Amino acid sequence: MTEKFQISIKPEFKSAETVRTKVKSTLDGLLSAVSEEKVDEFCQAVSELINNAIEHGHCSNIECELKVENEKAVFTLDTDGVLFDPTSVKARMPDFDERNELPEGGYGLAIIIQLSDEFTYRNEGNRNITVVTKIIGKSV
């Protein structure tokens, strides 16, 4: 069984939280034998992806789609912002500072890569299409 939803949002940070909440509730309602940790990781990757598009993409519209099939959750982000291939950048987590804390900001892409099983990008005309995939559990 395949489950899917689509939503268009304005490029505002509060919209990212709306999508994250919708993704989490959809996954919680559809999946059994699911790893709560993997769902949370997937939701964090989705949030970082949307936040990066809002902060750096200078887009006017964001299209989001979640597909759940078998054990996979696939989130697609489609924006009309500045063309940028996030898979072409060597992203890494920063080092801890002298207080053993991470600096604020600058590693969202590294978080996305670390928390997803697959991370792809393509551009279609003036659109950025970024896809995050995570194996999270068996669907009901």
Image (spheres, grey):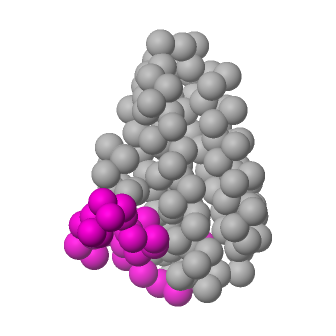
Residue at the (43%, 65%) spot, across then down: 108
Furthest residue to the front?
A: 99
Task: Name the chief secondary structure element in magenta.
Answer: loop
Q: How many marks?
A: 0
Residue at the (58%, 64%) spot, across then down: 50
In the image, residue 137 sits, relative to residue 26, either above or below, namely above
x%, y% of residue 90? 23, 72
Left or right: residue 75 compared with residue 90: right
x%, y% of residue 35? 44, 23
In the image, residue 33 sits, relative to residue 91, either above or below, namely above
Residues in magenta, as a range? 79-108
x%, y% of residue 67? 56, 39
Residue at the (39%, 70%) spot, across then down: 103
Left or right: residue 10 compared with residue 24: right
| Residue 127 at least partly seen | yes
In the image, residue 101 sits, relative to residue 44, either above or below, namely below
Residue at the (27%, 69%) spot, across then down: 98
Viewer-proximal residue, 28 or 107?
107
Asked if the magenta segment contains residue 100, the reply would be yes
| Residue 80 at least partly seen | no
Picture quarter with the C terminus? top right
Residue 134 occupies which quadrant of the picture?
Answer: top left
Asked if the magenta segment contains residue 99, the reply would be yes
Picture quarter with the N terminus? top right
x%, y% of residue 37? 45, 30
In the image, residue 5 sits, relative to residue 103, either above or below, namely above
Left or right: residue 104 compared with residue 78: left
